[in-house]
Image (tube, rainbow, N blue to C red):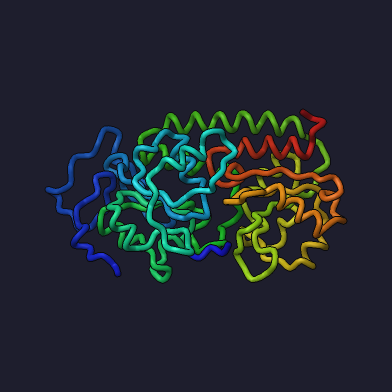
Amino acid sequence: MRLSHALITLAVLGLSAAGCGGSPTRSATAVPPAAPGYPVTIANCGQTYTYDRAPSRTVLMSGGAVGQVSSLIALGLEARIVGNAQNYGASDVPGRADAIDRLPKAKIQQGSWDITREGMLALRPDLVIGTTGFDFDAQNGYATRAELLEIGANTWLPDSTCGGPGTVKGTQTIEDSYDMLRDFGRIYGVSDRAEQLIERSKRRIKEIAAKVEGVSRPKVMYIIPGMQMGAAEFSSIGANGIWNDIFDKAGGVNAFGDATKEIFANLSKERVAKTDVDAVVIVNWRNPDPDAEAAKLFAQFPHWQAAKDRRYVVLSDSAYLGPDNAVAVERIARLLHPERF
């Protein structure tokens, strides 16, 4: 499917949200004292946000993502979420998909999997978390970061994707996942939990990388069947994304890593056919039968070594920015180098 990302009068929602500082409309006498361990200042996408206490009315934008909501759940912050648009319907972590399903669901704009400006302001958030600058673009019908700050809501985006969908600053790595966890740890006052998750992930990835050290590196395709992000037949092939670092740690290389500087490549069938592919990562995004998608792909490109070997793995959320990159590293490493495990 294609992802496409009456303004409520701000006076109606002009009360200050308890979790965030920075609203220019609040008087000095209206601002309660900071909670212990606060204020906390976070630099994000060229702006600085101050938190007087942990947010208690968090809203998550971007129905085509899941890394941010997964991070909050991994940090034990479910109770602080009042509206969530992020959901894949599946997870590589037992119990995670059910935990996401139990969260309060935000009313989303039909056809966009995202929350309208009206729906967002009605939720009275004190923190809104997105995945790209698209989530706060007024032209798309969404509340802007400035509008949200006016009602006392801070905002957060990954620093590498402050621009629109598909754009990325540099290349995301697993360290970007750790930076996100650290930011959330500081914002919500749970830095100790964040550091525990990070250390656990680093330790496991180091162990796996050691197992595949010195191996030949198969060429891997990363694709999200059913997600249309461009005009070409193959528009959801992972290119300049965090999976490049994940493949590297797992002893592989992205077959389409140089196809574009954007996160996803938008390619013709002919261009895809000319590329050597040794293994495939099928991403399960709201997909009723990801194994059938792998069979369909191999039928289209029977000359690939991946097709001859039926060599693929189905992942959902672990190969994205988020708390579970070690899961993706291990499962891909086992696919590519089973003899090392």
Image quadrant assignment for residue 34: top left
The residue nearer to you, when weighing 177 against 131, is 131
The residue nearer to you, when weighing 7 against 149, is 7
**Outermost residue, left side:** 29
- Location of the N terminus by quadrant is bottom right
Identify the residue shown where x is 52% and y is 51%: 65
Left or right, 327 with respect to 269, comes to left
Considering only vertical position in the picture, is 210 above or below 274?
Answer: above
Identify the residue shown where x is 53% and y is 43%: 322
Residue 319 visible in image: yes
Identify the residue shown where x is 46% and y is 34%: 194
Q: x%, y% of residue 12?
A: 19, 60
Q: How many marks?
A: 0
Identify the residue shown where x is 68% and y is 69%: 232
Considering only vertical position in the picture, is 208 above or below 289?
Answer: above
Left or right, 340 with respect to 227, comes to right
Left or right, 94 with respect to 187, comes to right
- Location of the C terminus by quadrant is top right
